[in-house]
Structures are given as structure tokens and as C-alpha cells.
Amino acid sequence: MCPASLADESDRGFIIPIGGGEDRVKEMQIHRKFVELSGGADAYIVVIPTASMLNETGPDYNRIFSNLGAGKVEFLPISRRSDCDNPEFSQMLDNATGIFMTGGNQLRLSAILGGTLVVTKIRHRNAAGVPVAGTSAGASIMSEHMVAGGLDNESPAEGTVTLAPGIGLTNAVIIDQHFTQRNRLGRLLTASSFNPFLIGLGIDEDTAAFIGPDNVLEVVGSGTVTAVDASQMTHSSMWDAKPGEALSLLGLRLDVLGEGCRYDLKARIGYPPPGHLALSALSVPDV
């Protein structure tokens, strides 16, 4: 467990980035926990499928959350910026107890939603205690600085990642998704080198980081969350690297967090699942 002294009291709702490819058929562990946080049988969940080009995306998530016991589920059919001015959609977000952004293309999502009343409503509702979840593209856009694209299967190098503004639910992290499955460590390290203040979160498929109002996250799902802390970096060659040139990044700290692990985003410390001892707490026999 994380020490209580590390937590800030706040009314902010959970921020829940999901790495994509989540289980939608069997245990549905991530979705189930999101429904519980949204109010269970009393929940009113609003789904935003804008990142997807598939017509069935919104109805699919309506079915998933309804089958998990959510009291009411609706989706916003937003496909262009003018849709964001719809007063009916604004009212739906005002009443929502949970908001979910689907996967697809994060640049489509930011180009349509960015700077609109819909984003303002999402931010206000989250600040008022409403949990906001997003999978894949919907996860990337949550942070103030968004990974918009880049190269997979590459070492850290100048030009391997493209950044764009996100919706700014948090300014503490930068998020990448489908992380292990698409070998995106290199581009997350490159993104972290741009601003060492940010903690890089690489989230695997079928895995979520449930970031609480105390800014302590818990890992839920079958994969891992990789946390990159560049705040103590002693050297970076990013500032004068030529296009495509490999980067030197010294003094990084990297934690790999599995199911039940926690990470304090303020203290930048990871913790094992409750009931598990950290190595530092184990006695080492004399030899």
C-alpha cells in the first residue's frame, strides 16, 4: 500500500487510460471496474466513439456497459466539429456519471474535439468527480501532451515520435498504448526526453492505469504498465540530435508494473501489490 501521507485530498474523478485490445468478452475486468466507479446500477455512462470510423463502435460499448449492469448508457454520434455544439450532447455530459472514449485515431479525435464545448465539459465533469476512461486513442488524448504517432520497433532517436496537444485531464504524464505488443519503448523514451518533467506511461493491451484523485495509479489487467521517470536524467543528446540520430539518455528510471502494482505520480515511486513485500523489506541471509 502507498503511504497515506503521499496522497492529496481531491474531488477529481479517476482518469483511466487503457492500452487498447481490452477483454470485451470474458472477465471484462477493466470495463467492470469502470462501471463500478461510475455508479453501477445507478451509472449513466456516456460513450464518445469519435476516434473510430466504424459505425458499430458506439453501440458495441453501449452493449458492453449495459451487460455489466450500468443503469443507462448512451453514445454521442460526433463525427465533425459542429456536432460538438449540440445542446443535447452538452446536457448528456452534464448528467454523466462516467465518460468513455473509444479507440481509433487520436489525431481524428483531437481535430474534432479539441477546443470545443465537449472537451470543456469532459474536463469539468472529471474535476467534479466523474471517472473518465479512454482506450488506445482515447487513452493517448487524456494527457496535456499527446503521442500523436511515431515509429515502432525503434531505439530512441530524433524523429521517432510525433507530439500534439491532448485534452489535458492530467499534465503529469504522457501516454503511449499497445505498448509491448508494438514495441513502443523507443518512442516513449524519445517523448520523455522532450520534457523530463513528464512521467511516460507505456500501457499494454488489455491493461489500464486507474489514476485516482490522489495521483496514485493502480494497474488492472493482464499486461503491464511501464513508467519512465526522466526527472533525474543526467544527460540528454536530444537538444542537438540530427534527424534520425540515436539518442543518449542517461540517468533514466524505469519501473514495470504488473496487476495490482501501484505508482505514486507525485513521489515517482512504485509499490508492489498489497500483501507483497518489496525486495528492500526482505531479509537477506548471511553467506
Image (cartoon, rainbow, N blue to C red):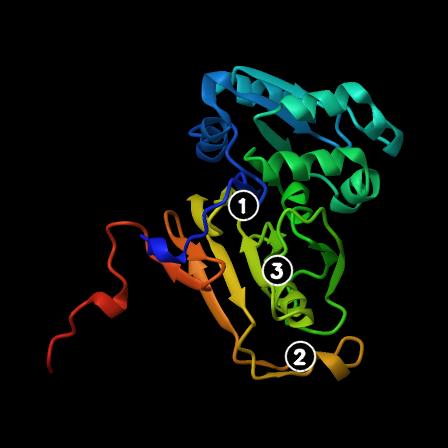
- Name the kind of residue labelled 2 in the image: Leu
Residue 242, how many percent across, how many down?
79, 81
Q: Which image quadrant: the C terminus?
A: bottom left
Q: Secondary structure at mark 1?
A: loop
Marks 3 and 1 sit apart, C-alpha to C-alpha, by 12 Å
Residue 218, how many percent across, how many down?
43, 47
User: Would residue 163 be found to the left or right of residue 203 on screen?
Assistant: right
Q: Tell me, for residue 247, which label it has, or none.
A: 2
Quadrant of residue 271 within the rendered picture: bottom left
- Name the kind of residue labelled 1 in the image: Glu
In the image, residue 88 above or below residue 153 = above
Task: Give the mark nearest the N terminus, 3 or 1.
Answer: 3
Q: Is residue 2 visible?
A: no
Residue denoted by label 3: 184
In the image, residue 102 above or below residue 10 = above
Q: Secondary structure at mark 2?
A: loop
How crowded pointer 3 is (Cα within 10 Å; few <14, some 14-19, many 20+) is rated as many
Asked if labels 1 and 2 touch by Cβ distance under 8 angstroms, the answer is no
Residue denoted by label 1: 205
Q: Is residue 114 visible?
A: yes
User: Would residue 134 be found to the left or right of residue 31 on screen?
Assistant: right
Residue 250, how many percent across, how many down?
56, 82
Q: Secondary structure at mark 3?
A: loop
Asked if labels 1 and 3 touch by Cβ distance under 8 angstroms, the answer is no
Q: For the point 37% across and 47% down, which residue is it?
A: 260
Marks 2 and 1 sit apart, C-alpha to C-alpha, by 27 Å
Task: Give the mark nearest the N terminus, 3 or 2.
Answer: 3
